[in-house]
Amino acid sequence: MARKTLRRLVADGQLYLYTAGWTDDLDGERIVSVALFHSETGREQHTRGKPMRANFVSREAEYPAPTIAAMPSDVRAVLEQALTLGWDGRREGWLLPACGLERPNLVLSTKTRLRAWASEAPMFVATIDEAEIAGRLAEALGVPPVAGSRGAAEAQWQDDRRYLLRSRWGQCVHVYTRSVAELVDVLRTLQRRAPQLGAAVAAIPFAQVSTSGDPPIEVVPPEHWASHPDATRHRGMREVDVLWTFSEADGPAIENYQFHPDAPDHLWRWISLRASGCVERRFPA
């Protein structure tokens, strides 16, 4: 991996070096990262001590927003806030949402988000179209709030196995898990806690994606899964959607039939989640 370019910043006669860039997180959110270091004149490419770091997301509800970049003025604001908090490079620091830093186009986020949490491992996700259930669902699952998330635009709960993100636009909550079995537990907990709410499921990334065409996909009727051991039907995201959980020889399984929002009689996606592999079948309108 190529080393990031270190850029100069001088304040009150003191030289600092910084890096600033962005990455797309596993849910599509663009994360801007800034790392700021002490340095010395004459040693412009040598950092001294430990950095101050900050992660940002955009203020705009757009993916990706055109303003999602750290400008020199944003980096200088990071430095000013870091010095106000007493950062001297002796230990690594993080600017977290509650620190008081405000920028016109950016909002401070937490240290850890999905890519850092999951690393290279696959994830499974349930999306629930009701943001207000997030805190109650996290409590029912026993997942604690993310340390340092106080004041964040995007509420977060996390442990080693589950990660809840409540939309900062107040629309939905996403529950990420490390296994299909844990996702089944999320769906069962949701059904007990809020049976009026539905969900849609997915895997990130999908092991296999197929699109209806030539040859056409043979669709197994949704009612077929009712005969499996422990079969439970859950509410889908929309009234016409179908969501089943059940047991197979290799463990818990999920089948989700999602119909097109503008054509409720047209099957849009059929998703099968297993520990042994996941398939998403797409049916263009």
Image (cartoon, helix red, strand yellow):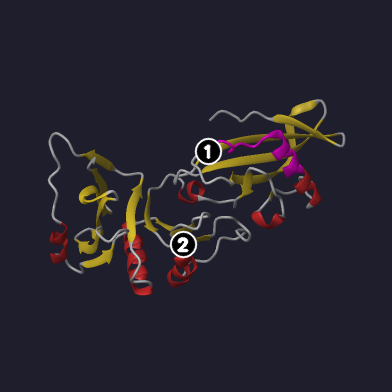
Q: Residue at x 39, y 55 (%)?
A: 178
Residue 151 lies, in percent from the top left, at: 63, 59
Residue type, label 1? Thr
Crowding at dot 1, Cα within 10 Å, few <14 / some 14-19 / many 20+, comes out as: few
Name the residue rendered at 51%, 48% in the picture. 116
* The stretch drawn in magenta includes residue 188: no
Q: Residue 49's quadrant in the figure?
A: top right
Residue found at x 55% / y 43%: 31
Give residue 35's quadrant in the image: top right
Q: Which residue is mark 1?
A: 23
The secondary structure type at the circle numbered 1 is strand
- Establish if 73 lies above or below 273: above
Mark 2 element type: helix
What residue is at 52 percent from the left and 66 percent from the top? 144
Looking at the rendering, the stretch of residues picked out in magenta corresponds to 65-79
Q: CA distance from mark 2 to mark 1?
A: 25 Å
Mark 2 or mark 1: which is in front? 2
